[in-house]
Structures are given as C-alpha cells and as structure tokens.
Image (spheres, rainbow, N blue to C red):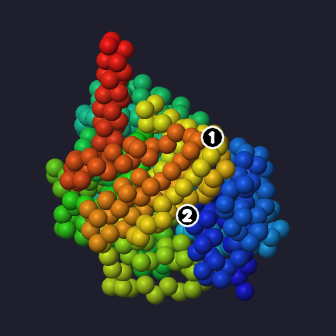
C-alpha cells in the first residue's frame, strides 16, 4: 500500500497537490515554516509538520529536515511542487537514497536540463532549433569575435540560471566584457556556478511552450501549447492556452520536436519545453526545459480535461500510463492571471502585509488556486503571489472577458496588488489582437508611469 505523499512545498501548489492526492485516495503530509503556520495547506493536509524558521534555507530548502519528516510520517512519495527543490537533482537523489519515490523525472534528466549548455546540446541532437550562441565561455574567450558571429543584441546567461534569473542584455559589443564579468559574479553567488554563455536576443519575441508528459520508456505525448509572453522582470504574469496567432504549421512542428526530445531522453513525468517564437520570421528556438509541474499548468488542464498532478502521482505509484496522443483533445481556450502582492507603480516591488480581506471570485468557467485566506500574511520570505485566477471559454475572447470580470470581482484588503494592472492589460488592444511580445508589459508599465507622473505634475502646477 502506498504511504502518504509528503509535499515539499508551500502555498497554492501544496493545496493543489493535496487536492489531487485526495482524489486518488492518498494521505498527505504538509510541511511549513514558522511564517506559514496559519496557511490553508497546513490545515488541508492529513498531517502537518513544522520545518523550521521562516528563511527558506532553514525550512523549505533544508533537505535533511525534509527527509527526517518523511521518515517520521511514513511517507513513501515526495512531491516537490515547483520552485525550491523541484529541479534539484541532488534532492531527487537523496529522496531515492532513502527508499522514497520522488514525484518527478529521473535525477539525471533534472541535471541534464538544469545545465543550459547540456540542455541546448540535447535539443540540437533531437533536431530542435536553437538560437545562435556559444557553449560555456572560457575565461580567455574572444568576446568580440563571438559577438560578431552571434549578432547584437545578445544575452549573457548563467548556465545554472532559470525562472527569469541570471541573464543580462548587451546591445553594444564594447559593453560585453563587463556584462560577462558581472554575470559570472552573480551566477557564482546565486547558483554556485559561475558558468555563462552567450545567446542571440530576439527583441520582439513571443514566449511559447509545449507541455509534455513522458512515460520513461521512449514514449511521450504533448498536451498542446501555451503562450506566456506577458512578463515583468522576465517572470510571467498572464499565461494562456492555446498560444494565439501561432500558424498551424509552426504549432505542429513545435509539438512534434518537443515530443521527440522528451522521447529520445526517455523522460518520465511532466515537463515543459519553452521556446522563443519570432512572429516576423515564423521561426521558433529552444529556450529551456523545466523538469517539473509549471505554475501555469491549470490552463492546460482546463483546455484538455487532463489532471497533470494526478498523472504525476499515478506514475510515481507505478501505474503504467495509457494516454495515447489521440485521446488528448483541446476544448476552447483558457487564460490565467497571477495576482501578486506588488505595486506596479513602483516597478512591481513586492508589497508584503496581512490580508485584511481576501475575497476571490466564484464564477462559472473560472478556477482559482490560492494558498492564502483572509487574515493570513504575505511575508518577505517568499514569492508574493496571492492567487492564480484562471478562466475558460469556448474561444479566447470569452475566456479573456471572463478573466477580466473575475478580477473585477476579486477583493483584497491590505497589501497593494497588481489587480488593476492585470485588468488593464487584458483590455489592451495589442494583447487582444495577439500582437504582444515578451517586452509588452515593460512598455505598458512605463507608459502608465509616465502618464501618472504627467498627471501629478499638472495637478501640482495648477
């Protein structure tokens, strides 16, 4: 008999895993830091165990303590969620070494795709298009020659980076040496690996990704595509499925090469293969592969009817999945907005504080994922996302309209939030016409700040 599922995470993703586990008849063990003792995931689990103080290094990143809790509670499965240790090959190995099952891919696949240089090489081997770039830069690399070959603008990227962290744009060749030096220093501090590489930067690209699920035996399927182009500070704010305005031929090719890459690796579990899409050239290029469940997985679930977390758990329990590609169908469109405790007027700075009131919408065609409730606190220790609000409809326009209405019905008292900014973004003509790209949010936010400053200046003068 399968023992409980230890959820090595917090907040809304912990609540999401608890829901899927309960539907499969599995008991759950939640963990929490001192800052999270009152959060819903603690109350929802069958059992909850304190990890330690609020800082992540003393709680959610404390591998020894997590394994100790697994042993104390008799857990047999460990689900890492996303973030924290979800893409740590060392954690996955430590879980296996204790005789437990890590709910995710093989540690070697996590390691392979966590190294951007090796991931790029694996993609090329599978015939996946990649942007012009370099391998790990040697200390004595001829940067001028590399810049001339790749073309400007380009990105200096940390090999161990990810999630929007560890990259710097360079527009002028003479600034490249300084950017490389700064990124090496940052990568050494943040990722304990100072390796960097160069890659062509596409100024007006879209961020499109393919959800895959591998069965570990060379078989893999895709669950269609998502567009995640609306980002601030390289982190996603609004995601949708399917990606709008994508030519059918490009969509099919993305799906085919993604399945081929996962299959050739012998990949097992949920994974997302991310691409930069150039609308002008109708070309796409491999960006990275995330070897975990994604924050935006609900939009895929809403258009396919598949429960990705349940698939993960069933595979971890040893069930041989029978999920033919022909059985995976897409119905309508879904859009997800990330509601953050942050201030868009102050360049999206986090806005921690106690939630005096949190009233989330209950509407037909709308799904809400949250790890907070009225009276709980958004702390400085973790990501300030309050909730994910997801709307489904028979078409994109209906889904967008439902999402905007759901956000209007959302009430948050306490911290500043990006609610109004999200509503405004959904109504921007450029986004409605699917002419947006990964820099759209920065442009819109800058325009809003300029308008606010002009209005304030006029008010002062009068």
Q: Position of residue 200 (x, y in %)?
A: 30, 42
Which residue is pictured at 43% across the width and 84% down the height? 323
Q: Residue furthest right?
A: 72
Looking at the image, residue 88 sits to the left or right of residue 290; the answer is right
Q: Position of residue 417 (x, y in %)?
A: 49, 43
Q: Dot 1, crowdedness within 10 Å: few (<14), some or many (≥20)?
A: some
Q: Position of residue 295 (x, y in %)?
A: 49, 59
Q: Earlier in the sequence, mark 1 or mark 2?
A: 2
The label shown at residue 144 is none
For mark 1, give the secondary structure.
strand
Using the image as rendered, state which of residue 102 and residue 334 is in the foreground. Answer: 334
Which residue is pictured at 36% across the width and 68% down the height? 392
Q: Which residue is mark 1?
A: 353
Using the image as rendered, state which of residue 33 and residue 154 is in the foreground. Answer: 33
**Residue 434 seen in this snapshot:** yes
The label shown at residue 108 is 2
Looking at the image, residue 308 sits to the left or right of residue 327; the answer is right
Q: Residue furthest top?
A: 461
Q: Residue furthest left?
A: 280
Q: Nearer the viewer, mark 1 or mark 2?
A: 1
CA gap, disc 1 to disc 2? 40 Å
* Quadrant in the picture for residue 47: bottom right
**Is residue 86 placed above or below 140 in the rendered structure?**
below
Looking at the image, residue 309 sits to the left or right of residue 78; the answer is left
Q: Position of residue 297 (x, y in %)?
A: 45, 65
Which residue is pictured at 41% across the width and 28% down the height? 179
**Is residue 278 placed above or below 66 in the rendered structure?**
above
Dividing the image into 4 quarters, which one contains the N terminus?
bottom right
Dividing the image into 4 quarters, which one contains the C terminus?
top left
Q: Dot 2, crowdedness within 10 Å: few (<14), some or many (≥20)?
A: some
Which residue is pictured at 43% across the width and 32% down the height? 345
């Amino acid at each position: 008999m399968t023992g409980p599922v230890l959820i090595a995470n917090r907040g809304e993703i912990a609540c999401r895993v608890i829901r899927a586990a309960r539907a499969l008849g599995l008991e759950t063990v939640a963990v929490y830091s001192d800052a999270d003792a009152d959060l819903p995931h603690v109350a929802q689990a069958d059992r909850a165990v304190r990890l330690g103080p609020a800082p992540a290094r003393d709680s959610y990143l404390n591998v020894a303590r997590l394994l100790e809790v697994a042993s104390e509670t008799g857990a047999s499965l460990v689900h890492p969620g996303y973030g924290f240790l979800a893409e740590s090959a060392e954690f996955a190995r430590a879980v296996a070494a204790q005789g437990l099952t890590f709910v995710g891919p093989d540690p070697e696949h996590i390691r392979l795709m966590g190294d951007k240089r090796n991931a790029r090489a694996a993609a090329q081997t599978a015939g996946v298009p990649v942007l012009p770039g370099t391998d790990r830069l040697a200390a004595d690399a001829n940067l001028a020659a590399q810049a001339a070959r790749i073309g400007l603008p380009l990105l200096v990227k940390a090999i161990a980076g990810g999630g929007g962290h560890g990259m710097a744009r360079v527009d002028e060749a003479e600034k490249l040496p300084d950017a490389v030096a700064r990124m090496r220093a940052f990568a050494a501090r943040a990722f304990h690996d100072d390796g960097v590489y160069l890659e062509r930067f596409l100024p007006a690209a879209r961020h499109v990704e393919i959800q895959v699920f591998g069965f570990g035996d060379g078989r893999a399927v895709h669950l269609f595509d998502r567009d995640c182009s609306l980002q601030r500070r390289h982190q996603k704010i609004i995601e949708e499925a399917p990606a709008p305005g994508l030519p059918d031929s490009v969509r099919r090719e993305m799906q085919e090469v993604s399945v081929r890459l996962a299959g050739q690796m012998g990949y097992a579990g949920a994974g997302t293969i991310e691409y930069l899409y150039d609308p002008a050239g109708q070309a796409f290029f491999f960006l990275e592969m995330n070897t975990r469940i994604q924050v935006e997985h609900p939009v895929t679930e809403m258009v396919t009817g598949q429960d990705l977390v349940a698939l993960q758990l069933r595979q971890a329990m040893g069930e041989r999945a029978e999920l033919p590609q022909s059985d995976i169908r897409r119905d309508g469109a879904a859009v997800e907005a990330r509601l953050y405790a942050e201030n868009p007027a102050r360049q999206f700075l986090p806005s921690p504080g106690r939630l005096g009131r949190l009233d989330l919408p209950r509407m037909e065609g709308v799904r809400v994922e949250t790890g907070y409730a009225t009276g709980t606190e958004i702390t400085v220790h973790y990501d300030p996302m309050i909730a994910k609000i997801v709307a489904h409809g028979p078409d994109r326009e209906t889904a967008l309209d439902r999402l905007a209405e759901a956000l209007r019905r959302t009430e948050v008292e306490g911290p500043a939030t990006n609610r109004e900014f999200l509503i405004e973004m959904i109504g921007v003509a450029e986004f409605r016409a699917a002419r947006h790209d990964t820099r759209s949010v920065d442009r819109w936010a800058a325009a809003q700040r300029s308008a606010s400053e002009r209005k304030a200046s006029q008010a002062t003068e009068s």
